[in-house]
Image (cartoon, rainbow, N blue to C red):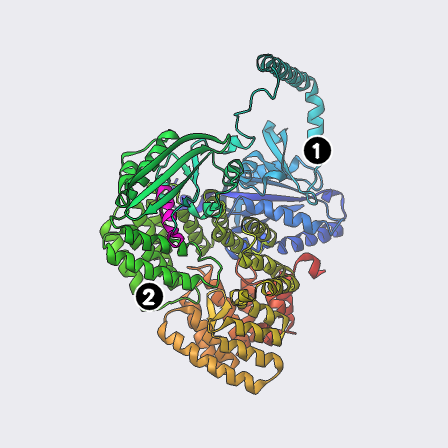
Amino acid sequence: MSDEEKKKLRLEIAHVLFVDIVGYSKLLISEQSDLLEHLKEIVRGSEEVRTAEAAGKLIRLATGDGMALVFRNSPEAPAQCALELARADSQHPELQLRMGIHSGPINEVVDVNDRANVTGAGINLAQRVMDCGDAGHILLSQHVADDLEQYEKWRPLLHVLGECEVKHGVRLRVVNLYTDELGNPAVPEKFQRIGGAKMSRVLWREIVIVLLLIGAFITGAMLFFHRSGSPSSAPSTSPVATAPAIPKKSIAVLPFEYLSEEKANAYFADGVQDEILTDLARIADLKVISRTSVIGYRETAGRNLRKIGQELGVAHLLEGSVHRAGARVRVNAQLIDARTDAHLWAQTYDRDLADVFAIQSEIAKAIADQLEAKLSPNEKSAIEEAPTSNVAAFDFYTQARNLMLNISFTAVRFDNLRRAITLLEQAVAIDSHFFLAYVALAEANDQLYSLGGGDHTPARLAAADAALARVTELRPSAGETSLAVARHRYHAYRDFAGARTELAEAARSLPNEPAIMSLAAFIDRRAGQWEEAVRELSQAIEHDPRNIFFMQQLALTYQYMRRYAEMAAVLDRAIAVDPARVETKIARAQVELHRHADTRPLHDTIQEAVARDPSIASVVAENWINLSLCRRDVDELARALTSLGNRGFGESAVTFDPSFGEALGKYLRGDSVGFHEKLQVARSKQEETVRRQPDYSAPLCALAIIDAMLGRKDDALKEGQRAVELTPVSTDAVSGTEQRVLFAVASAWAGAKDQALDQLEAMTKTPCFLSYGQLKLQPYWDPLRGDPRFEQIVASLAPKETSK
C-alpha cells in the first residue's frame, strides 16, 4: 500500500449507536420525512451529542430510515445518548425507535461522491445488534456490555439475552439495556423464537444440572449436621457474603488511642499510625486504605470491627495504642481479621522515645509477614528508613499533616495551609534532612498558590520551588519525589503533560497512593477527558472510600458535565460518611439550584445551619452571598457579606473583594450612584491584585467585569480577552471555560452582546460550571435578559420538565 493510500485509510476504534425508525418502509413519503425530522430534532437535543460534537468526537451518518452516531470519546457515550433519545422519544408516541450499540474498528474513507464517510465492522455490527430488537429496545453487543459493567451505575441496567444469529450466519451475544422508565424490558421477538427452538436441546440439560446441584447441597448439609449436631453448635468462621469482593491481602490502619495524660500531644499517636500506614502502603502486594478514610474511626469504645471492615472494603484491621511518658514510649498493636473478629497477631513495644521510628517499621514488617505479602528489596529498604531522627521535628510534621487533611471545600482551608506551612518550616529547621516534611511543605505551598482566592504571588511560587528543590536533592529517585514534582508541575506551572509523566513514575513505588489517582483525574479534566476523570476519581475513592474531598471532586466533575443526578448521588454518599459537614450539605442543596433554578433547598440548608450554630455563618458566607444574589434578597446579602469579613467571594477561581458584593447590593436596590461608588472601591483593590499577579487570568477576568459595569468598555474587553488568551480552553478545559463564561459577563455589561452570546452558546455545548440556574437567576446576566437568543440559550440548559 502506498503512503498516499495509508493516509486515506485511517483505522480506529469507535463506539457506534445505530438508530432505526420501526415500520419506516410502510409509511407515506411525507410521514417518513416528518419522522426523520423528529428524530433529527431529538438527536440535536441530546446533551451527549452536543458534548461530543463540541469536542470534535462525533460523526453523524444518515442511513435512510435512521442514522448512525459514531462516538470517538468514550464507550459510555452511545449508551448515555441512547437513554437520552429514549427519554425524548417517549414524548413522541408516533416515533418508534430501536437502537443497537457496538464498539469496533471504523475506517474514515472518501466515497464515490468524494465525500468523507465511515465504514467498518464497528458500523456493521452495531446495525446487526439493532436488528435483533423490536420497538423501544436498546441492545448492546457483549463487548460493549463488558466495558459498561466496569461502571457501577450501568450494572443494574444490563440484562443478558443470549446469542442471536444475524446476517451471514454470524452469532452475536446481545445484552438488553433498560431502566424502570426507559428502554424495553420485553424479550425481543427474535429471541423468543430462538428460545422455542432451543428448548428441547437446552432445557433438560439445565434441569439435570440444577437437580444435581440441589442433590449435592442436600448431601453436604446432611453430612454437616451429622458431624456438628446442629447448625448452631459450631460458630461460623467463614467470611460474610461480601468476602469475594474483598481482597485477602487488604488492610486498614485505624487511629491509635493515645493513653498519656497530656492530651494536647494526642497528635503523636496519629503520627505513629500514619507512619505504619505509609510503610504498608508501599507494598504493592497489599491493598491499604488511606488515612483520610480511617480517621473517622478515632473513637475506640464500641468499635464494630466487622462493620468497619465492610465499610472500608478490607479483610484486616490494625488497631493499637500509644503511651508516651518522658523519654519512654509504649506502643501496642494488634491485627484483626475483620471478617471473623479473630485476633491474628499482637505485640507490645516498650522502648526509648528515640526508637519510635524503629517500632513503626517493625510493626509494618510484622503485618506484611502475617498477611503473607511479598516484599521487594526496595520496599523493605523504604520501610526500614526512619522519616527523621528527631522526635520534636516529627511532632511539628504530624501536626501539619493533620491540618492538611482538611483542605477540601471549607472556609478554613487557607488558614489551615498557612498554619501547616509554619509547622513544617519549624520541622525542617530542626532537621534539615527531613525528606517527608519538605514533600509536605512543597505540597502546602503549591495548594496555597493554586487555589482560587489563595496566594498566587511570585513569593509563594518561590517558596514552593525552594521546597521542591530540597525534595529532589534529598531523594531524587523516590516515588514521593515524583509525586511532589507532578503536583508542582500541575499546580504551579500548569504543565499537565509533565505532571502526567511524573505520576507514571510515582506509581511504580507508591501502588496504594490515591493521590496519584486523583491527580491523574485532575489532569484529565484539564485535558477535557471527563469520563477518564470520573473513572480515576472512582478508583481513588475505592482506595480511600471515606475521603470527602475525593467525593466532592467527583461531584464537581459531574456538575461540569451537567450530570446532576450523579452529582447528587455522590454528595448523598459523602453526607452519609460525615453527616455533620455543612459544606457537603450545601453542595447537595446547590444541585437543585443548578438543575432546576430552585433556591429553596439551599436557602433552607443555610438558614438551618446558621440557626443551629451562628458561628457557622462565616463558613457558609460565600455560598450565602451567591444564594442572596440569585434570590435578589438585598437584606440577606448584607448579612452574608458581614459574615464573610475581609475574605473574597466569587465563582470558582475568580474571587471578588467584599466591596464588589456591596456594589451588587446597591445595584439590586436600584441605587446607581452607590453602585458606581462601590465599584470604584472594588476596582482599586482588584487592580492591586492584578498588579501583584499580572499573568494570572482569574483576577484579570474579575477586573474586566468591574470595568464593564463601570462603563469602561474598551478596558473591560481588552482585559477579558487577555484573560481568555492566558488560559485557552484547548490547554485547560476547566479554567479555560471559566474564563470564557466570565468574559461573556464582561462583554454583556460592556454592550458587546453578540460577543457575549457567542461565548455563552459555545459554553453550553461543552462541560463547564455554567448551569441553567445560574443563567436563570444571577444578576450578572441582566444585560442579556429579554434577548431572544439569550432566552433560547437558557432554555437549552433547562431540564425537560422545566422546558415544556
Q: Amino acid at mark 2?
A: Arg
Q: Which residues are magenta?
A: 262-277
Observer-nearest of 129 and 793: 793
Q: Amino acid at mark 1?
A: Val
Observer-nearest of 662 and 784: 662
Q: Which mark is residue 460?
A: 2
Image location (x, y in percent) of residue 122:
54, 39
Query: Magenta includes 83?
Result: no
Under tag 2, what secondary structure? Answer: helix
Identify the residue under disc 1.
187
Image location (x, y in percent) of residue 566:
58, 50
Image location (x, y in percent) of residue 759:
53, 67
Judged by depth in the image, the label closer to the viewer, 2 or 1, is 2
Q: Dot 2, crowdedness within 10 Å: few (<14), some or many (≥20)?
A: some
Query: Magenta includes 270?
Result: yes
The answer to whether any part of residue 43 appears in the image is yes
**Principal secondary structure, stretch drawn in magenta:** helix
Image: 241 above or below 703 = above
Image: 491 above or below 152 = below
Observer-nearest of 767 and 12: 767
Image: 405 above or below 129 = below
Q: Residue most toward the bottom?
A: 673
Q: Earlier in the sequence, mark 2 or mark 1?
A: 1
Residue at horizontal 50 percent and vertical 55 percent from the top: 55
Q: Dot 1, crowdedness within 10 Å: few (<14), some or many (≥20)?
A: few
